[in-house]
Structures are given as structure tokens and as C-alpha cells.
Image (cartoon, rainbow, N blue to C red):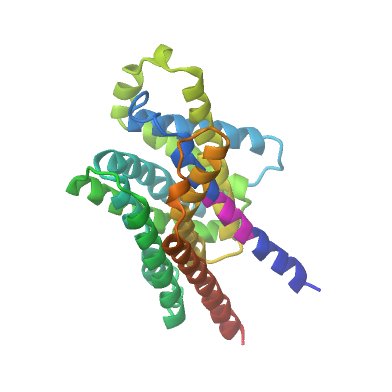
Amino acid sequence: MSSQPNRNHTFNAHISLFLVNSLYAAGHIIAKGVMPNYLTPTTFIFFRIVGATILFWTIKSFLPKEKIEKKDYKRFFICALFGITINQLFFFHGLNLSSSINSGIIMTTNPILVVVLGYFIIKEKITGLKLFGVALGAIGAILLTVSGNTAKGESFLGDLFLLINSISYAIYLLIAKPLMQKYSPITVMTYVFTIGSIYMLLYPPTYIDTFSTDFSSIPSEIWLKIMYIIIGVTFFTYLLTIYALKYLSPSVSSSYIYFQPMLVIVFAYVFYYLNVSEDYRNTITIPKIGYMLLIFLGVWITSYATKRNKKSLKA
């Protein structure tokens, strides 16, 4: 009787991760033109973190209070540092300096880093099958990114920033996992984002960039895009990710990042028919469908390997 609810939670966690990467993928298209045309990377990050913090506290005010143990505050501060502040700052500034094709390729290092760092931080076992699944997904994502992107412009510093972003997010996923065994997703994210907001307020460029922004020149459609990024690509993505971590391993959670290049292409195709983007119908090709299947297979193998490893440990 107890296995059915557990299976349901696992299924919901997988659906949550797919929704997370769908929101991210749609955001790549919807939010086009916001940065750096209207907001600098630092101001955009500040809006995202503070906006999401307000939303988390609003939801939390209607829920039963959870007391945080003093020994866990250190972990919350570390999660906020790596999962919010370092992650966001280095990603946006890296994307600003590097090319989108490089960011797509460097993004695929995250699941690999989670597997490697997971062995040292939370003692998550590395199996050959899991490594094979991660590698397969990475190959599919890299091939899809290379074949689907022709953007130019790159820098070593930008690529370095993106790599630091990938490392910091991997650490965040691993550090946040134990918190999910004790607290609700809303509680975890409320405190993590609150601390992340404090970090951003201690970062001097936040004030310089924000006060120099001409908010009166931002049109209404750009404000709608900014709201989507705050609510969809920040509030919901972090909440759903932390929920998924409650029932899935960090390596499985991070492997879903491989879906993003595929979903970007799909959303670009769909948004064309909704008259909200340019014509991308020529982006769907037979080779790309093959790369997408590689991604699906890689994520499934990673998930299967983790599940099999858990069963062997219980036995």
C-alpha cells in the first residue's frame, strides 16, 4: 500500500522537473530583448530574487509555521550563496560576455559535476550505468546545441563565468537535498531567497545599476516579459526543483537540464504559430530528432541507474 504514494511522488517529481525546463526554455524566447536593452544583468537578477522572495513569503504566510533548527541556518546560507547569488550573477554576466552556443554546451557540464561532486559531498555512489546515461544526454544536448545555434561572439572570461555558474548550481543541488528531508519546499525556498536578497543588497553594483536604469523607457510588453521571468523562470522553477529534490537524487534532477536545448526549439516552433516569435519551422530536422531521442534515453538511463542503486542498497 505504501509503494503507490511513493510512486506517485516520484512521477510528480519527474513532471515537475520537465515543467522547470519547459519554463526555462520558453523564457529563452519570451525574455529576448530585456537584457541588456532595458536592464543590466545585475538589475535583472536583483528584480528576480527580490520579486521571488516576496512571492515565497506571501505563500508561506498562509501555511503552517515551520521552526528552523539553528544548526541548519549555515546550510541555508550556503544554499543561498551558491544556488542564488553566485549562480545568477555568473550565469547572466557570463551569457552577456559569451555566445549562446557556448552557454548551451557548458550547461551540459552540470549533471556531470553533480555526479562527481555528489560522490564527495553526499556520498552518492557513481555507477557505470549512471555515467553512461549522463554522457549520453550530454552528447545529445551538445549536438543539438551546436546544430541549432549560429550565434557569434564569445570570450574566455564569459565561458569561465558560465563554468563557475555550473559548478555553483551543482553544489547547491547537493547541499539543498538534506534540507528537503526536514522542511517543506516553500520553507526552504523562502529562507534561501531571503538570504539571497541580502547577499544582493550587499553587492555594490546592485545599487549602481538599478539607480542608473531608466524605468520610464521600459514598454509594457517588456514589463510583462520581466514578470514572466520573476514568476515563471524564478519562483516556479526553484520551487518545483526543490520539490523534486525531495523524491529524486541530485544527479537525476540535474540531468533534466539536457531537455532545455530541445524544448527551446519546440517552443520556438510553437510560438511562431502563436505569432509571438519569428519563423523557426526549418529548425526541426531528422538529425535533431535523433539528438532529442539521445537526450530522452540519457535521462531515462540516469534515472533508472539511480533507482536500481537505491534498491540494491536496501537489499
Q: Residue at x 59, y 58 (%)?
A: 244
Percent of width and height locating residue 115: 41, 69
Answer yes or no: is residue 252 visible: yes
- What segment carries the magenta color? 13-21
Percent of width and height locating residue 145: 36, 55
Image quarter for residue 182?
Answer: bottom right
Judged from this view, the residue extending furthest toward the bottom is 315
Answer yes or no: is residue 69 visible: no
Image quarter for residue 195?
Answer: top left
In the visual, does 189 lie left or right of 113?
A: right
Residue 265, relative to residue 125: is it above or below? above
**Depth check: 173 or 255 in front?**
255
Q: Residue at x 35, y 53 (%)?
A: 104
**Depth check: 247 or 134 in front?**
134
Residue 233, relative to residue 76: is it above or below? above
Magenta-drawn stretch contains 98: no
In the visual, does 94 lie left or right of 110?
A: left
Percent of width and height locating residue 243: 60, 54
In the visual, does 165 lie left or right of 194?
A: left
Residue 313, relative to residue 6: is it above or below? below
Q: Residue at x 47, y 24 (%)?
A: 222
Magenta-drawn stretch contains 17: yes
Percent of width and height locating residue 176: 49, 56
In the visual, does 288 lie left or right of 98?
A: right
The quarter of the rendered structure image containing the N terminus is bottom right
Main SS, magenta residues? helix
**Depth check: 131 or 276 in front?**
276
